[in-house]
Image (spheres, rainbow, N blue to C red):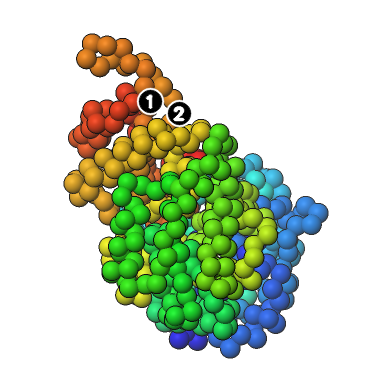
Amino acid sequence: MTKERVVVLDFGGQYNQLIARCVREAGVLAEILPYDTSLAAMLADPRQLKGIIMTGGPDSVYAPGALTCDPAIFQAGVPVLGICYGMQLMTRFLSGQVGAGGGPEFGHTEITFAAHPLFAELAAQEKDEPGAGRHVWMNHNDAVLQAPPGFQTIARTDRCPNAAFADDQRRLYGLQFHPEVRHTPGGRQILRNFCFSVCACRGDWQMSDLTVSLVDDIRRQAGDGQVLCALSGGVDSSVAAVLVHKAIGSRLTCVFVDHGLLRQHEATEVMAFYRETLGMNIIPVDAADRFLGKLAGVTDPERKRKIIGGEFIRVFEEEARKLGGADYLVQGTIYPDVIESGHGKAAVIKSHHNVGGLPPDISFKGLIEPLRSLFKDEVRRLGEALGIPRALVWRQPFPGPGLAIRIMGEITAERLRIVRESDWIFREEVAKAGLDQAIWQYFTVFTGVRTVGVMGDDRTYDHVIALRAVTSSDAMTVEFAELPYALLAKVSQRIINEVRGCSRVVYDITSKPPGTIEWE
């Protein structure tokens, strides 16, 4: 187990877990703590505090009630890196000036880096990552107008003369841009440079260390209680279930709920996989009529998610009572679910059924969510470290609300048929093309739009199906997949010919942001 760590102080930004993830990728343990954690508390941990990273956040540092930190961290001799809001807060504490300055900057921005250890190797990365030494991703209104005494400017843009600064004597640094997002090509190298060149980390952390700590955490939380696991068949709930089983053994019972919103053949495949391949104790529940009845006539996406989240809990509570009671419920919640549902000061993008969609009156003592701070690719690496079969670890992601959020408007049997059949064709053709593991996620959407067409010399007025395929590593930001035209043509032809009621197929080429992966 590692004896060193970097603390990430969380000021409520959307991408704060990405910072921790980048540090972990470098082989250094990253521990996320609340923004107001005292320096004394950080130093009390037996693992050596090698560095502190202050994250971005939605506040203005001079606004009433703006989040702040323990000023002692700037005097401790521990390296500190402030990112965006963190840089501005550091500036204000150390007698610099923050304000609107040259105006806001959003998105890809050209930058000029000075020679500094934080930016080492960026120029050399240009071949593999174009723009690594020239472009960053900005997302700010305020900026540092005047650096604090003792700081030198080490990067600038046209609008931001202090895009990065450094006080090497006190080992204090600030970046106005976001190195943690993939839109900053050299960002991961910058964070590596901070960890190794500035903080002198050894890089001795690995995924197996996380397995040990998560199992220990689960044992502490569960105590000697009985635990029920909400098993969906996806990688997240599967890894969570295996972790909990490793921690408490036979005191875990898994429940798989067919809510009538699954993909073609999903229920049969999931049950066979868990029983025959993993040998887990799993109870199937057919609740299709129950869920579809609750969703009848509902068109608002948030209401759909909340109804599904609430009904899931009610089903799990009923199953727990049949078993004589259960103290805790395991969920495969991962970090993108949490942040999009409005964690801390982050805005609600959409309420995930297992976070913002949960009812307030849950009968369980608590939730066990061992993956809550991880991203999808980290969950997959953890799954491989646990020995879970690769076929399950790399299974196509599927949201808990299922096809409910891939049908725009009211959910009906006819619409479910159309989206199921079209989705099956799309997935089948992607697999035939050998792209099923190269694409992060791919599916079809019932758009709710009807258009005029012509089939067999007759006029048609049928439905439009949208294809959605994206590439990503963390689900926080995605790009649309550049599918071959021949594949798109084949999928379109098959859907129109084989799925009754479809007359047009379109391809969604929206990235995230501004879109989300799912349509609802």
Amino acid under disc 2: Gly
Extreme-right residue of the structure: 64
Residue corresponding to mark 1: 463
CB of mark 2 within 8 Å of CB of mark 1?
yes
Is 46 in front, or is 73?
Answer: 46
- Residue at the spot x=34%, y=59% of the render? 270
Q: Of the numbered discs in the image, which one, if any, rests on residue 170?
A: none
Q: Of helix, strand and loop, which one carries label 2?
A: strand
Give the CA separation, mark 2 to mark 1. 7 Å
Residue corresponding to mark 2: 448
Label 2 neighbourhood size at 10 Å, few (<14), some (14-19), many (20+)? some
- Residue at the spot x=52%, y=64% of the render? 319
Extreme-bottom residue of the structure: 46
Determine whether 103 is above or below 119 in the image: above
Considering the image in quadrants, where does the N terminus appear?
bottom left
Is 80 in front, or is 3?
Answer: 3
Where residue 17 appears, as percent x and y from the top left, is 53, 62
Where residue 474 appears, as percent x and y from the top left, is 43, 57
Quarter-wise, where is residue 303 in the image? top right
Amino acid under disc 1: His
Compare marks 2 and 1 and give the one earlier in the sequence. Answer: 2
- Residue at the spot x=56%, y=73% of the render? 324
Quarter-wise, where is residue 449 in the image? top left
Determine whether 312 is above or below 383 in the image: above
Determine whether 298 is above or below 504 in the image: below
Q: Of helix, strand and loop, which one carries label 1?
A: strand
Where residue 80 appears, as percent x and y from the top left, is 60, 71
